[in-house]
Amino acid sequence: MVDAATFDIADLVFGRVVLVTGKGGVGKTSVCAALARLAAAQGRRVCVVEADAQRSSMDPLFGKAIGYQPTQVAPNLSVCNVTWYEAMHEWIERVVPSARIVDLILSNRLVRLFLDATPGNREVVTLSKITWLAEDYDLLVVDLPASGHATALMNSPSRTLELFEVGPLHQRSVESLEMLSRPDTHLVLVALAEEMVVNETVETWTTLHDNVPQLSVPMVILNRASRPSLSQDERTLLERLSERHASGPEGELLLAGRWEAQLEQATGRAMERLAEEIGVRVIDVPRLSQEQGSARLVQNLSAALARKSVRGLKR
């Protein structure tokens, strides 16, 4: 069992599979890229996998076009986008020995409609490819869909086993469930210090805990956080000064100060609630400037995550 109280960023970096999800817009793709860069810096062979994204979000982060096959974007670091149709093609190739027959199967519109409509097929095929990729790298970092779709994806092997007692889907579901159950497979939730995001994060954790209890979910990364820097007396003074200087340059400066104070309070509330209701390690990383581009943002985020580790990770 994972000790949530002592779980460290290094446990992710030196794990086998890290699955990352969260509400749309929380920065989970950047977190995936940052974790992967951090692991690659430790000398681990890493692959970042986008799970069935219609269009890769990794292109601007690494400056290369990302496709189905892993593309090396830096030393020890590759990236790919596991799209369903291409994963299905590979999946059928592993079942049917003849490439010509595979092409005939997938070129038939009715067959494709059937495959697309089969319960759990899309999810199991995607997870199968992730399972196969995990055999080729030291660490797989998986950029899952947003939390609602991610929970369905994680729950798909168990649901498929209930529907199919034998056959290829049954076997692939068994393999996927074994991968999800490994002690070095972990799912990380990414959140923001916003009430709606925190609500969804708690709901996602509860759903995963209830439906996929064998999956380790030991950490929440609170992105774009503002650590408390003002005392209560300083916040009171800020409010009083704002009443006297409601406009002009002084008013604008004080407004920025009040906004920062509100962000700090929101961060404190979010960290307290997440720790209390989920009971796992909550790691906060600061808001980072995007002025120097997405690639630089990922580098800075990777360094911020390294600083949160107690084990002296290389940056």
Image (cartoon, rainbow, N blue to C red):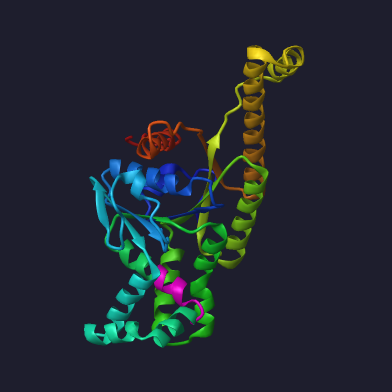
Tell me what residue is drawn at x 41 percent, y 66 percent: 179
Report x, y in % for residue 149. Answer: 54, 63
Report x, y in % for residue 27. Answer: 49, 45
Residue at the farthest front position? 248
Decide if residue 163 is on the left or right side of residue 93.
right
Main secondary structure found in the magenta portion: helix
Decide if residue 291 is on the left or right side of residue 25.
left
Determine whether 226 is above or below 177 in the image: above
One can see residue 93 in this view: yes
One can see residue 170 in this view: no
Between 276 and 83, which is closer to the camera in this rendering? 83
Report x, y in % for residue 38. Answer: 35, 41
Decide if residue 214 is on the left or right side of residue 42.
right
Instruction: Answer whether residue 121 is magenta in the image.
Output: yes
Q: Which residues are magenta?
A: 118-127
Number of numbered discs visible in the structure rendering:
0
Tell me what residue is drawn at x 40 percent, y 36 percent: 297
Between 178 and 119, which is closer to the camera in this rendering? 119
Which quadrant would residue 148 be assigned to in this image?
Answer: bottom right
Determine whether 126 is above or below 204 in the image: below
Which quadrant would residue 303 be assigned to in this image?
Answer: top left
Decide if residue 186 is on the left or right side of residue 73.
right
Tell me what residue is drawn at x 27 percent, y 82 percent: 103
Quadrant occupied by the C terminus: top left
Tell me what residue is drawn at x 45 percent, y 31 percent: 289
Instruction: Answer whether residue 177 is magenta in the image.
Output: no
Between 87 and 9, which is closer to the camera in this rendering? 87
Determine whether 174 is above or below 286 in the image: below
Report x, y in % for residue 5. Answer: 55, 44
